[in-house]
Amino acid sequence: MLNSLSVLSSQSPVVAPQGAGDMTIPLILVLALPAAGAAILLLGGRRTDRFGHLVGTAAALGSFVCALVLFFNLLGQPADSRAIQVDLWTWFSAGRWQVELGLLYDQLSALFLLLITGVGSLIHVYSIGYMAHDDRRRRFFAYLNLFVAAMLMLVLASDFVGLFLGWEGVGLASYLLIGFWQHKPTAAAAQKKAFVINRVGDIGLSLGISLILATFGTTSFAQVSELAHEANTGVLTAIGLLLLLAACGKSAQFPLQTWLLDAMEGPTPVSALIHAATMVTAGVYLIVRSNFIFDLAPDARSAVVAVGTITLLMGAAIGCAKDDIKKVLAGSTMSQIGYMIMASGLGTVGYAFAIFHLLTHGFFKANMFLGAGSVMHGTNDDVDMRHYGALRKAMPVTFLTFAMGYLAIIGFPGFSGFWSKDKIIEAALGENLLVGICAIIGAAVTGFYMTRLMLMTFFTKPRWEEDVHPHESPKVMTVPLIVLAALSVLGGLLLINDWIVKFLAPVVGEVHEHHPPIPAVAVSVIAVLVVAVGVALAWFLVGKKDVPREAPEDVSPFVTLARNEFFADAFNDEVIAQPGLKMIKGLHAFDDGVVDGAVMGGASAVGGLAEVSRKLQNGFVRSYALSLVGGAVLVLLALLVVNL
Amino acid sequence: MNTIPTPQIDYFQVAPMLIVLGAAVIGVLAEAILPRRQRYLAQVAISFVGLLSALVMAVFVFKRLDPNSLSPKRGQVVAMGSLAIDGPTLFTWALVLIFGLLALMIFAERHLEGGVLAFAGQAAAMPGTEAEREASSRGLEHTEVFPLLLFAVGGMMMFPASTDMLALFVALEVFSLPLYLLCGLARRRRLLSQEAALKYFLLGAFSSAFFVYGISLVYGFAGSMSYAGIAQAVAGSSDSKVLLYGGLGLMVAGLLFKVGAVPFHNWTPDVYQGAPTAVTAFMAAGTKVAAFVALLRLMYVAFGAIHVNWAPMIWIVAILTMVIGSVVAVAQTDVKRLLAYSSVAHAGFILVGLLGIRALGEVGPQDADGVTAVLFYLTTYGFMTLAAFTIVTLVRDANGEATSMKHWAGLGKKSPLLAGVFAFLLLAMAGLPLTSGFTGKWVVFAAAMSAGAWPLVVVAVLISVVALVFYIRIIVVMFFADSEDNGVSVAIPSPLTSTVIMIGTAVTLALGLIPGPLLDLLSRVGVFIR
Amino acid sequence: MTTPFIALSAILFSIGAIGVLIRRNAIVVFMCVELMLNATNLSLITFARTNGNLEGQVAAFFVMVVAAAEVVVGLAIIMTIFRTRRSASVDDASLLKY
Amino acid sequence: MSLPWLTILFLLPLLGGLVVAILPNRQDGSAETAKRAALLVSLLTLVLAIVIAVRFQADGGYQFTEETMWIRLFGAHYALGVDGLGLSLVVLTAILTPVVILAGWNDGANGRFGERAFFAWLLILEALSLGVFMATDVFLFYVFFEATLIPVYFLVSGFGGPDRVKAALKFLIYSLAGGLIMLAGVVALYWQSAKITGTPTYLLSDLANIDFGTSVGRWMFVAFFIAFAIKAPMFPVHTWLPDTTEQATPGTSVMLVSVLDKIGTFGMIRFCLELFPEASRWATPVVVVLAIISILYGALMAIGSKDIMRLIAYTSVSHFGFIVMGIFVMNSQGLSGANLYMFNHGLSTAALFLVAGYLISRRGSALIASFGGVEKVAPILAGLFLVAGLSSLSLPGLAPFVSEMLVIAGSFVWSPWAAAFAIPAIVLAAIYILWMYQRVMTGEPGEGVIGMPDLNIREIAAVAPLFLLIVVLGFFPKPLQDVLNPSVDHTMSEVHLQDPPAKVGGEEVK
């Protein structure tokens, strides 16, 4: 059924950047500032403890300023010559292959740059307050800067290998930050899990790059996009599937989704920045960036859509069942990224909307995560929503900003999420009815779980522990919340006059004819109604009842399934980890016994033979004489048998 | 039937041998004439002068060979066709004489036994009796060992030079008989020494009987005792060759006994262990050289034409020798005995080199052929084994030499220099590069491979791995085993012994680093005259 | 014909060899070796006859001389052993082994 | 070019080592003088190596060549020379030796022999290793190849863990067994070169022009390959490596794994490929399969290792699998990746061994289970450990990434299946490194870890150059590639190989 996706645009745009000219320095600075920040803070060690957070924040802000300079410069250029490139140096070469390390700044990167540095800066500011009491704050900022630098590398790279550099850089930063509180065994386990599962995705990226190299002899976006139509569809499909695997790992898509919920072990600003707003959307970026491949590989796109659809439902379901506020948000993130992935799988009609949703999601999800952080900050770092309740009075700013995010995510008309999600549902319905229906169901479920979260946290009766005294967070934390809340509300402005679609068209291609089967207005109405049903359901199931402090055990199998994240971890453990460890144990036995044993056994055999044969030397002359006679006979036989 | 002609002997050519035998006779006379106290000095002097002048003489003779000419006749057959004075002979002579000189030095060592020789004070006195104690307290010595050494050296010179089966037999006995006696003359552990002598003697005599019976059969086939005659008969005759192969087999058995090849090797460990260490050192180096060159000459000159026919037999023996020698050595716990097994294993490797025989036309003037290979290997092995056994004489406890391996534990701490040198020699025996052992191995392998015997080389290579194990075991014991205080110490010898160790080690190193000149020399002169 | 002589010599040689293998007394063992040498002498002389030259006969003399020399050395060794151990059995001299 | 640069480079550490061995201890019995002398010698050697590297012109051929007849009968020469590959490994050796000396400043104290011996052996080992990489004569190479075993043997069995004597013996036997098998091949080279050209020769330049014929060439290839496979080490002849590194001091392990084991892969390129091109192509499928097994097997074994040093050893088995695969996939990408990998692996494994060594020396145990929470008490140590580990798992931005990427892509060109089978190793690598990090560094510090001091200046200074290089070469491997790639091209032409053309965009891409 998914195969009915059509190739809408036979010719994807070619990436044809120009020299960077004046913009070379800002372009390099945008990346270099956070990188330098990270280096200074890491190498400076304890000497930089006192002002480390300031250096880190300044680096992020400086980077943001550069991004703005670049963006306005870009807006000043004609639409078809907005892409610029800085070639730094030849990274490596072999035979005919040559991989350049370069920065490509075009419309797509521009938006990402703003999101990363903008939201990134806000989160830096927020973290000054959030991490104020952590004696390793300097290191935290170092890692944050490292993350920003890597993420910028990811979206600025001018070729796939450069992208891989950023890709793994953000993975490393994510690893370091998830496990920032390493003394917690859960955090340590989560960080490793995140990295390892991401590595599974990297298999896709590594092999994808290999296949690209083998096919095109180059990995630069410019050259590959130029040559892509010459390659045969099978190869392109393979590349597409491999890239999808990579995207699944980084963006926590089915079947590599399990790490994201565990990643909530990291400090909340990390969850906001990395595991909501930016890094986890890298998969979407990868697919959109590789549009020249996916456009020519409809089968690969079908797979992308399928993965996105499955994940959006899965994430939503998990969001409904969790009591941990961050995990609900994480499930939600999975689900929302599912939307984006699905949209990007739709091809040219979807790319722009995928990015649009990515941006709005970046705003409102960061907002909500930071809000959740603020809540935790006020409740002794408790994350269990069953221990909250009625916090709206204790933390009015947090509540109000969170509410903006809430309205945005459920798609309340007028809020940013409404516009972006609506467009995706519309596009999905246009391409495939089933996918569209799934998207609509997802929207309803979103309405349910987000309402549940709102109710359990800010409404209903207080269920705090004795010693918890909820209080509002300091200004340094609330100001970023307010800014993000404003963005969550206003993000939809980007769609005015289809601005974002037109803006991105030179990169992702333009849809010329698009006739949705159902009128757009009808889709919006349906979506809003469905969400309303979800919200109402939550109101009746959660808002009208008392929320028990302990999670009830006697729940339906469906809830159990969702609570346990569809038993994906159990599956991985039972099917991969445990047998794997058993096999490794077996291998060790094999190594000691068979591989080493063969050689060592040979050695002892020689030793044994030596012991036996030395007994032949029994000290009796007459037996020596016998051996002498035997020798003579042997010699004679050898001579006579051979010769006569 | 015919008249017996007056023997024509070119005395200049055989002078080195005659000098040694003459010195030996003088030594016997000196033993009879001189008072006991003067004998030691006189005997050492006679032997030294004899050996040295023989060596000088050998060099003179060698010069006359004109080794630089590439003409086929390098050397000549003298003494009525019974001795060949050619490149290999003279090289062997020089070698045997040098080994003789080195052996003389360790024979003459008196520091280790408190001012007397390491030989029995009075062989006739029974062990553990009053007579023995008295002989000991009076400081009696058997200075007869020096003439015996000279006789053995003389025999060893004649053996490889023989181009006549009768001369070969006589030479064999001339060098064997003194050795039988020397083996039984240890000052300490006399029971073992006597037993060694008995075993060596009985088995030696037994093998001589085979050898001489083989001679008679070959003579029956060829109608001549001389190699030239045999070669002619072998190449020409179309008679039944049962006599030939029977005789060849028995002769080879006798010679293989002398070189200690399996399964004729059983005497080697027992005799090497029981004999006075100085004698063992000399036997290991000298006998091997003399016997191998004799074997080489016999096989190449007399039976060279049928080398394809006898090669399989040597293959079998070579493999057996390498395998048994190396494998059994692994289980040894006595250093001397271990070195004896190592000597067996080395005999196997030399046999591999022996198989480097190729048809005459195939061997280029600069090729590593069997003769070059074997001569080179013998040189390297002789020096290292002499030095190694000499070192054994220095590790002592209250009962004399402490040869049990557990006594060697921690030697690296007690005497790093000695242990280091010994380790170096062991590594050389194992064939590690930068030692002569490696070059030696390489050259025998190259010779065998060039003759197409590559499977044998592969076997040899694999066996070498086993051989490594036991050499390294000694190193481990010396350097890495903890020694309880077992009263073992390293004796400080006189310069005589030190010199031997030094020379042996230096040659081992030198031939590892710059073997080129010697190899070039050997490849030029290493051709038997026929 | 000479075959019987050769056969005889072979038989003598074998008897000697077997004697070495089965007799314990060192002296007897040694005598067996002498028997083998004499078998050799017989064959040498026979072959000298067949071949029509003197070398074999000369060789026989040499073998005799060598045998005599061996006796000297051998008896000396056997004597010392006998004196120490009060036994001339070759099987008793088996301290050196393995 | 009158100075015999390479001979000087070889003699400097050799004589230095001998001098260090005989320098007297100070009056208080410390070997400080000797240690400083050793460091000085190694630094001088490094300077000399750098001078040579600077003067080197990357043109694919051998430079600084010296050639003197050594043993005429064998056709053996004292012939030295470096091409890009040789030079890179020479420089690697020269870099690592001072690092090891400084990092292992006190490692010699508890050995069987004095401290002086430790440093003297190290320098001698450096000299011989340099010799191996500089020899352009097979016989000379073989001599150096075997000679390196002696210093290593004494370093392992003299200094390190309680079972070191046994481990050293195992190492020695394995290596010598390989060496002897190779000896058969070396002798066969003599035989064949004498037979084919009339005069025996061991000069690489002469041998490369000889066509040995199919069956002989293959046999000789096998003889050489087995030796190099043991050295490298590859499955199934790898078991000596974990045993050895478990017992040896970290410095020794570095010299062993980062330098000496490279001889194996170096030899595969220099001898297997260049001398026996036909046989190499013939053997490729088998070798690649073995390499893939090594890659996965090493990684899996590393995951299950309980001892840090053993774990690192198994990671090397895996990495060497990659190198070998790169060599035998027969295209310039794989080969270039393999060449680069040899250098980078040297750096990253050295860093890992040395930092792990710091860690172990503080705890007195190498068992992973005896650690936990180190990060909290010794953050610098933990940080360096992590970076070293990340470079071992080929994180982009660190040196080994480029090489691993090239090897994978190169093998992909040869056969997508090869790459597909090898690729799970990148996940396994993440598991073995990060799981180890998790168990050792994270959590609350336990007994024996509390109070553990962080790294001191000397320790940081020793490994700092490694980390610097790892990062710099991660982003800018060009200088190294400029040296290596011409020799890759040279090797490719020796093997008569050309890269398959790109499937798309037929014209030369830049």
Image (cartoon, coloured by chain):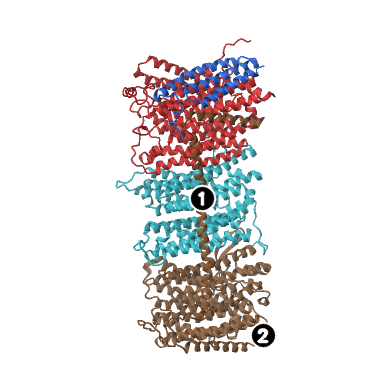
Chain colours: A brown, B red, C blue, D cyan
User: Residue D470 or B198: which is nearer the viewer?
Assistant: B198
For residue B106, which quarter of the picture?
top left
* Percent of width and height locating residue A282: 54, 73
Indicate whether B367 appears above or below A67. Answer: above
Contact, mark 2 vs mark 1 (Cβ under 8 Å): no
Circle 2: residue type: Pro
> Which secondary structure lies at badge 2?
loop
User: Residue B452 or A540: which is nearer the viewer?
Assistant: A540
* Percent of width and height locating residue D35: 37, 49
Indicate whether D270 appears above or below C43. Answer: below
* Percent of width and height locating residue B477: 41, 42
Quarter of the picture containing the C terminus of chain B is top right
> Which secondary structure lies at badge 1?
helix
Q: Is residue C37 left or right of residue B424?
A: right
Q: CA distance from mark 2 to mark 1?
A: 71 Å
Q: Is residue B302 visible?
A: yes
User: Residue A61 or D422: which is nearer the viewer?
Assistant: D422
Circle 1: residue type: Gly
Residue farthest right in this picture = B238
Q: Is residue A68 visible?
A: no
The residue labelled by disc 1 is: A597
Q: Is residue D210 left or right of residue D232?
A: right
The residue labelled by disc 2 is: A517
Dot 1: chain letter: A
Mark seen at residue B70: none
In primary-sequence order, the first of circles 2 and 1 is 2
